[in-house]
Image: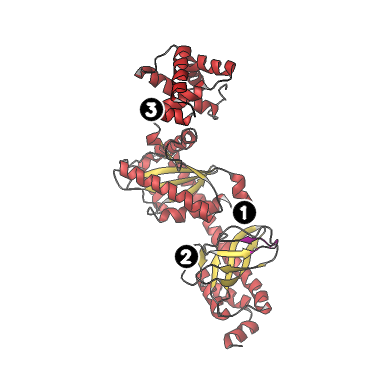
Amino acid sequence: MSRKRHFLNNTSMYELLLKELAEGANLDSLANLLSDKLENPVAITDSVFRLKAGNFFSYKVGQVIPISVKNSDGTITKYNSVFDKKNESMFITGEIASGRPVPCKLLRLVVDGQKYGYLVIAEHQQSLTDEDLLLLQQVGQVILLELQKINQINEIERKYMSECLYDLLYNNFESREVLMERIGHLGWDLSAGQNVLVLEVDNFQKLRRQGLSIKQLVTEISILTSKKYPNPIIAEHNDQIIGIITGSRGNRSRDSIQKMRDFTCWLQEEIKKNLADVDLSIGVGRYYTSAAEIYRSYQEAKIALRLGRFFPGNNSCSSFFDELGVVRLLYNLSYEQLDDFCREILGRLIEYDQKNNSNLVETLRVFLQCSGDYNITAEKVIAHPNTLRYRLKKIEEILDTDLNSYENILNLSVAIKILVMRRQGFGAIFPE
């Protein structure tokens, strides 16, 4: 047995680490001290194995450590899924998939049902003994004390940040000077102009089944966004996640919008990969150069998020307010106005479909979506081109309209959009 091992077995690590904390040690110091005593790499991670502290192989703080484990029910869970809801043991045996797999032990860091993360010990040099595991339980309590203290400080900061964000999103400031003073206290730099993103989890039940919270999702999105945009502001608000993304001037250019589109697609893929298939919908507001106009971008992002579910277009990753076209004008009309216009333009065709069990409204929708291309429309509605022409002729007769008239096409396109919005849940359901 080495001197270090002998020292570990005969010295209270609990008291030693408490002493280190009292003298100003941080999580990194605790992890490195423990690693030195155990002669094995040690990491402190969050609940999805993102490194928070410790010199752990080549991983950097913020990176996710790929870990696979064997659950108590015999199933194998790999690569960063939240795996231990069925596993009641304090220690979990797993392996780190880094080149040649390295066996490891995971100690849950949990207090009153709240999971703060894991203490991960790689059995790289030698295996842990039963005595080591008993001592590590004591060590875990010390680390939990520090994590709780950090969490309390973060909660105070989050509360102040949340209050300031609320005022920013709803333009609740007495003056521009007050606004700049508040955001200055938080270290936010909003001088270069910004877009607001509103992100929403598509299935909260899936998130909760994975043992994840919105706060963990906020942390994940913040880390990922920082890789693409400097100093993003990411926070929770009303069960949604708000992102204020600073960009270069002229950010309404086509190239900048494409960059943002690529980012939202990448972000969704990374979230699904790191957090067990969590799906996000994203609405993107327009770019504004003044922090005093962030509230406008926020309102636009909310509209884009909501309407994007009805009209995903060619890009299902996110919906941009800039690209909603006439739909964003419809958003501001009353349901009665929308319904009246839709019935005026399409009412007879809807009634015909109901009485004859036909689907001419859908044929018309696809025809308009395909810009009047007969061949593409016929392919999408699975009909012979001649059959399609017959259906379109029937539509013209029922509606007493001409599908070659630009004005008629415009009215029909708007009415179809209204119908889609209403039938998919925009306000009261429009009759089928």
Q: Is residue 146 magenta?
A: no
Residue 257, quarter of picture: top left
Q: Quadrant of the N terminus?
A: bottom right
- Magenta range is 70-77
Question: Residue 11: image x %, image y %?
Answer: 63, 82
Q: Residue at x 49, y 28 (%)?
A: 381
Crowding at dot 1, Cα within 10 Å, few <14 / some 14-19 / many 20+, comes out as some
Position of 335 relative to 323 (above/below): above
Residue 147's x, y, as percent? 57, 64
x 59%, y 49%: residue: 207
Compute the Cα span from label 3 to label 2: 51 Å
Q: Position of residue 259 (x, y in %)?
A: 36, 47
Tell which circle, 3 or 1, labels the residue nearer the N-terminal end: 1
Q: Which mark is residue 61?
A: 2
Return the residue at label 1: 211
| Residue type marked 2 | Val
Secondary structure type for disc 1:
loop
Q: CA distance from mark 3 to mark 1?
A: 46 Å
Label disc, if present, on residue 371 of the rendered structure: 3
Which residue reaches farthest left? 250
The answer to whether any part of residue 355 appears in the image is yes
Q: Is residue 308 above or below residue 58?
A: above
The residue type indicated by label 1 comes to Gly
